[in-house]
Image: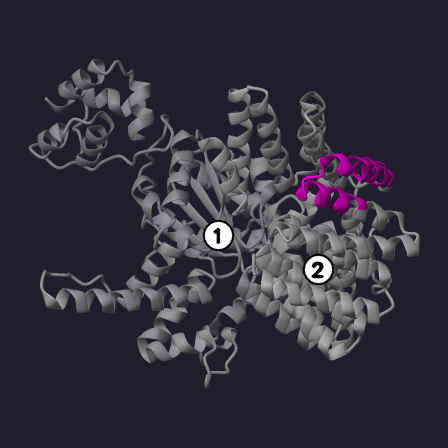
């Protein structure tokens, strides 16, 4: 009856025996015998067929009425075999605790096994403490039912307290004993290679799941892998065992720290803190508030654990014992001074995050260990290859090799090509090792190289934004072993700035801690980028650090640079009254430092701020004084900037005819100095002058040229301004649809920048 129903259901779906075999993981020959009444259907097969064919349990209900039978072991491949029992079945999987989460990785592994024909190898890798052994044992436990000849486990000892990694022949001897072959006379007399071959042959004949834990390298595992049969070998390693994938078709399963929500659930489970049942009534609000506090505490603890499973489990034990005092200690609240790695350990047992990191670190060659230590000095979350090369004082080629080795060892992550990140706990450990093994002077020199690299690279990028003749202040020299970047285009420079923006800001703090002049020189070099990209809060933070450094140095030039950064930040945040004071003090300090170009530059910035507030007469006076300073100095870049502002002031005061000549002259000078952005800005203002004079054809032509140049620069605010003004010109000519398209684009850009000029564009659209 059951076999006949199975055939009917299969044929209804148009499935062959092979297709059914692939779905339920029983061999085609066994399924044929069941359908023909030669074998009794087992409950396991009935359940699998019901699930595959969505029959609402019909086969299971029928199979329960049949006499019990011993089910053959299902196979991950259609042509699986079920060998006869050979003595006691080995069951060596260790107790590792229940795994939480990892459903995506488990599903990936099971899908791979379902499609695999022949023996299967799964290579699980990840950093220390990420839960590789727990995952491998959990996966093997799931496979235990379908691999009836046993589950084997061997520690390959790449890390830990055991003396050295286990060679393949020793692992083979262990596996032979587990398979009840180790005491055979012929096995005892075999040489190492013969024992390894016997393991391969035995695994090929039986359906076994093998966990080879903590492998040092692929070569330690490869000799043991069978070429035929249906066994599954799961290998864990802190290293990426790429050779197993390339040469043996292994599935690589990389494990990362848990997602935040899964990390909190893991801690809840370890603590046995379930979510409270919230019945209606006054008590429900109290319970909900208490649950919210618990969730916040667990989320904070999980964050300080870096979502690393080992750290999370240790933290759960300490939370159960110490309560919120442990959470406060992790937060570093007053009264708690223990390092985080001291807290994430079980005293007296040798179990802790630091100890497992120690094992990985001790396995590194000297040059990789040094790179690992020094990488912790980088202040940002993600470091670029060139910046790390400066930190190490090495070439980019050598640095790429070292970082590649650390990536393979799961000590750093390459988040995208050439960009590297270190886990928070590993960073803390690496800094400990750096302070213990590298002297303060060596660490200071590394930091000095890195800071100089960032400063000189920003200066090179600023040349492309503002032009080669821009105002500069003297900066620190390039140290030996530091090779700053250069750029071939403004877009390339801006892309680098966008990648490094967080790191550039982060560099200001260590520069200040080291009493380095970079603490005020870097914010001054950065202000054009941060202002033009509308990163005003970043600029404010950098300016405040610069202010601290300048106050400590008590030098007029340092104070002028800090005040300029603060003025630009406050103006960008539309805190104009505060910005005015910074602008005035900056001009005074540049004058005191004997830097007329700096004084003229900051007065032009002040004038532009005044024009944004429609203080046009005040702006005109500032521009005039700036032009006098630049003319007396003979600086063409400053003169070009002043002429650009002269033209803008004339436009603001309703004198477009007087604006054209200085704007055209500014265009020519900016072209000579190579600033594409300032050329585009000049063209936008020139186009507006033509429009106000009634020459709309010339205006549209100039706006188009400005938009082309802005597209090369990626300066969104300039693009929006040109589109806004272009829309006005098009609307005046009666081209309403084209005007609306320009205004809609401008409004979208201004909205993304939180720029108040969006309201002016919206007014045009409404009119």
Percent position of residue 312, x then y: 40, 65
- Residue 382 visible? The answer is no
Would you call the spot at circle 1 few (<14 residues within 10 Å), some (14-19), or many (20 or more)? some
Q: Is 26 on the left or on the right of 577, as rendered?
A: left
Q: Which residue lies furthest to the left in this view?
A: 65
Which label was assigned to residue 104? none
Q: Distance between the residues labelled 2 and 1?
A: 22 Å
Residue 721 within the segment the image draws in magenta = no
Percent position of residue 278, x then y: 15, 61
Give the residue at mark 1.
256
Would you call the spot at circle 2 few (<14 residues within 10 Å), some (14-19), or many (20 or more)? some
Percent position of residue 30, x then y: 27, 25
In the rendered structure, which segment of residues is drawn in magenta? 643-672
Q: Which residue: 39% across, 74% down?
A: 327
* Mark 2 / mark 1, whichever is N-terminal: 1
Q: Which residue: 47% across, 31% down?
A: 765
Identify the main secondary structure in magenta: helix
Image quarter in which the N terminus is found: top left
Q: What element carries label 2?
A: helix
Give the residue at mark 2.
368
């Amino acid at each position: 009856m059951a076999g006949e129903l199975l055939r009917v259901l299969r044929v209804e779906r148009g499935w062959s025996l092979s297709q059914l075999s692939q779905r339920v993981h029983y061999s085609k020959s066994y399924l044929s015998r069941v359908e023909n009444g030669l074998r009794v259907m087992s409950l396991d097969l009935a359940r699998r067929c019901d699930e595959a064919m969505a029959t609402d349990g019909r086969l299971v209900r029928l199979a329960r009425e049949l006499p019990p039978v011993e089910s053959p072991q299902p196979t991950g491949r259609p042509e699986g075999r079920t060998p006869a029992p050979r003595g006691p079945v080995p069951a060596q999987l260790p107790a590792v605790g229940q795994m939480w989460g990892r459903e995506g990785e488990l599903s990936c592994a099971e899908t791979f096994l379902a499609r695999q024909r022949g023996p299967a190898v799964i290579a699980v890798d990840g950093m220390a403490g990420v839960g590789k052994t727990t995952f491998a044992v959990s996966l093997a436990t799931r496979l235990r039912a379908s691999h009836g000849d046993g589950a084997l486990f061997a520690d390959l000892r790449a890390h830990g307290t055991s003396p050295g990694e286990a060679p393949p022949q020793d692992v083979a001897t262990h596996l032979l004993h587990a398979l009840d072959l180790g005491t055979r006379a012929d096995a005892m007399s075999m040489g190492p290679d013969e024992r390894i071959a016997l393991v391969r042959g035995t695994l090929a004949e039986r359906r076994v799941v093998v966990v080879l834990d903590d492998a040092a390298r692929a070569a330690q595992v490869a000799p043991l892998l069978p070429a035929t049969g249906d066994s599954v070998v799961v290998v864990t390693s802190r290293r990426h065992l790429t050779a197993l994938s390339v040469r043996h078709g292994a599935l690589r399963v990389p494990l990362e720290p848990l997602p935040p929500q899964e990390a909190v659930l893991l801690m809840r489970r370890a603590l046995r803190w379930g979510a409270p049942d919230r019945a209606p009534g006054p008590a429900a609000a109290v319970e909900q508030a208490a649950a919210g506090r618990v969730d916040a505490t667990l989320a904070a603890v999980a964050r300080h654990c870096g979502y690393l499973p080992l750290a999370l489990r240790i933290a759960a034990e300490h939370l159960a014992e110490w309560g919120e005092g442990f959470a406060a200690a992790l937060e570093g609240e007053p009264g708690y001074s223990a390092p985080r790695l001291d807290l994430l350990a079980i005293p007296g047992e040798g179990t802790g995050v630091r100890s497992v990191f120690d094992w990985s670190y001790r396995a590194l060659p000297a040059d990789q260990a040094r790179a690992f230590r020094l990488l912790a000095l980088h202040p940002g979350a993600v470091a670029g290859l060139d910046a790390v090369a400066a930190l190490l004082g090495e070439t980019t080629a050598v640095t790429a090799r070292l970082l590649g080795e650390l990536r393979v060892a799961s000590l750093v992550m390459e988040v995208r090509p050439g960009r590297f990140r270190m886990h928070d706990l590993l960073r803390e450990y690496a800094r400990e090792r750096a302070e213990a093994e590298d002297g303060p002077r060596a660490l200071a020199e590394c930091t000095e190289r890195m800071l100089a690299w960032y400063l000189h690279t920003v200066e090179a990028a600023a040349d492309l934004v503002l032009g080669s003749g821009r105002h500069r202040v003297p900066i620190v020299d390039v140290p030996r072993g530091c090779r700053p970047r250069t750029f071939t285009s403004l877009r390339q420079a801006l892309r680098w700035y966008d990648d490094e923006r967080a790191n550039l800001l982060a560099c200001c703090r260590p520069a200040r801690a080291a009493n380095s002049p970079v603490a005020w020189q870097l914010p001054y070099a950065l202000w054009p980028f941060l202002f033009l990209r509308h990163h005003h809060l970043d600029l404010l933070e950098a300016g405040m650090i610069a202010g601290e450094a300048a106050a400590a140095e008590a030098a007029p030039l340092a104070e002028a640079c800090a005040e300029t950064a603060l003025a630009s930040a406050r103006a960008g945040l539309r805190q104009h009254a505060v910005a005015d004071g910074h602008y005035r003090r900056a001009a005074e300090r540049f004058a005191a430092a004997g830097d007329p170009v700096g004084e003229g530059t900051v007065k032009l910035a002040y004038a532009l701020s005044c024009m944004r507030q429609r203080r046009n007469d005040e702006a005109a006076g500032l521009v005039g004084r700036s032009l006098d300073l630049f003319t007396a100095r003979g600086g063409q870049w400053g003169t070009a900037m002043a002429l650009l502002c002269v033209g803008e002031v004339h436009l603001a005061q309703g004198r477009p005819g007087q604006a054209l000549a200085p704007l055209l002259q500014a265009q020519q000078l900016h072209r000579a100095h190579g600033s594409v952005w300032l050329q585009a800005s000049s063209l936008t203002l020139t186009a507006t002058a033509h429009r106000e004079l009634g020459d709309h054809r010339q205006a549209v032509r100039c706006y188009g040229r400005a938009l082309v140049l802005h597209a090369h620069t990626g300066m969104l605010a300039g693009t929006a301004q040109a589109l806004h003004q272009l829309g006005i010109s098009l609307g005046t000519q009666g081209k309403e649809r084209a005007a609306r398209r320009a205004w809609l684009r401008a409004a979208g850009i201004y909205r993304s920048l939180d720029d108040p000029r969006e309201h002016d564009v919206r007014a045009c659209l409404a009119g």
